Image (cartoon, rainbow, N blue to C red):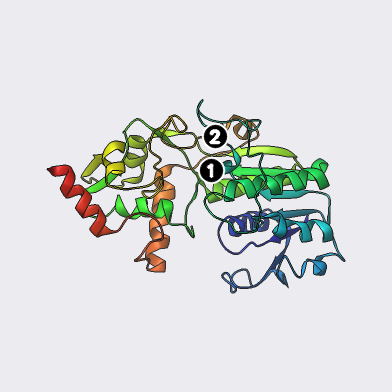
Amino acid sequence: MKVLIIGGTSFVGRYIVEELMKKGHEVVLFNRGKSNPGIFPELRRVLGDRRKDAIKLAHEKWDAVVDTSAYTPADLRPILENVSTDHYTFISTISVYTDFKKGAVKENAAVFEEEVEGDKVSGETYGPFKVMCERLIEERISDKALVIRPGIVVGPADPTDRFTYWAIKLNGEGPVLIPGSKKRKVQWIDARDLAEFTVSQIEKKATGVFNVVADPVSMEEFVSGVSLGELETVWGNDHFLLEEGLKAFELPFWIPISADFPEGFILADNKKAKNEGLTQRPLGQSTKDTLEWSKEEGLVELKAGISKEKERDLLEKLKR
């Protein structure tokens, strides 16, 4: 197949490109050439801004298009108006869902209804904007559209550092502060497993919506799976962390348990994707690969998590 990738050089898109190439497909990249410009030198590139230069795509027919970088309708409209394709894959998010009170949400669960004004993506607008993008796709090309809703994506090259924080912390020097209860469930998806599933569905010309997440495990199991050796861990419960002013996700993979989030996290049902072939690599493998990448990159200051000083202060208070 001749496949156009919108983006394709940062994280999720990068692994989708690699998987498509592995399968022997012809891949063309459309992006601004700013993120990892030296990657995939063997591939043809169409340089341009998706909002201003989508007209450059109008003169070719694509067997499939994969959109990894649309966050708002303003990102999406120019592409939909200019591409001619038999199949369109949109990378969305499980953050589109609004109700996690009854456990893992299925693909037909309630999503944000209210439209967001403006064009600024934030923690509050990210999910609603993605819903607006999904609706635009549904209106324009529903019979050709595949919508992928991942959970927290992990693995090498992760620009958010959410999983990287735990991979480094749990394989360094203890003690390490762990948030919430041991039994609360958490969930993720390795970017490479996400890419393999997405490409397999593109090859089938599958349409519809899929939650793409690993099976949930307890936070205790998560910590054990990420820790490749022995390390002292100290658990801080929700009450303590809230009293100390911490907010949801300030420690990655943690939301205080509440009526809205009884699991202490957001969980999605993955049965539909698993029935279509979704596989999950071991957590330890994701950890080893992420650690190796972080060392190669020389990561020192991470975008996610709390500082060593803050953690030390909280640990001291827990000892009193």
Q: Is residue 190 left or right of residue 129?
A: left
Q: Where is residue 38 in the image (x, y as percent from the top left)?
A: 59, 74
Residue at 25% in and 53% down? 311
Q: Position of residue 93 (x, y in %)?
A: 59, 45
Query: For the residue marked with disc 1, what is the amino acid?
Result: Gly
Q: Position of residue 222 (x, y in %)?
A: 37, 39
Asked if 319 appears above or below 73 in the picture, the reply is: above
Residue at 57% in and 33% down? 270
Query: For the residue marked with disc 2, what is the amino acid?
Result: Ala
Residue at 22% in and 46% down? 231
Residue at 79% in and 48% down? 87
Could you say which is closer to the camera, residue 96 or residue 172? Answer: 96
Say which quarter of the image contains residue 180: top left
- At mark 1, the secondary structure is loop
Could you say which is closer to the camera, residue 160 or residue 37? Answer: 160
In the rendering, which numbered label is found on residue 181?
none
- At mark 2, the secondary structure is loop
Lower sequence index among marks 1 and 2: 1
In the picture as drawn, the residue positioned furthest to the left comes out as: 320
In the picture as drawn, the residue positioned furthest to the front comes out as: 117
In the rendering, which numbered label is found on residue 151?
1
Could you say which is closer to the camera, residue 52 or residue 229? Answer: 52
CB atoms of marks 1 and 2 within 8 Å: yes
Please name the residue that numbered disc 2 is placed on: 268
Q: How far apart are marks 1 and 2 (CA)?
A: 8 Å
Within 10 angstroms of label 1, few (less than 14), some, or many (20 or more) residues?
many
Q: How many labels does the image show?
A: 2
- Answer yes or no: is residue 152 visible: yes
Q: Where is residue 55 in the image (x, y as percent from the top left)?
A: 82, 68
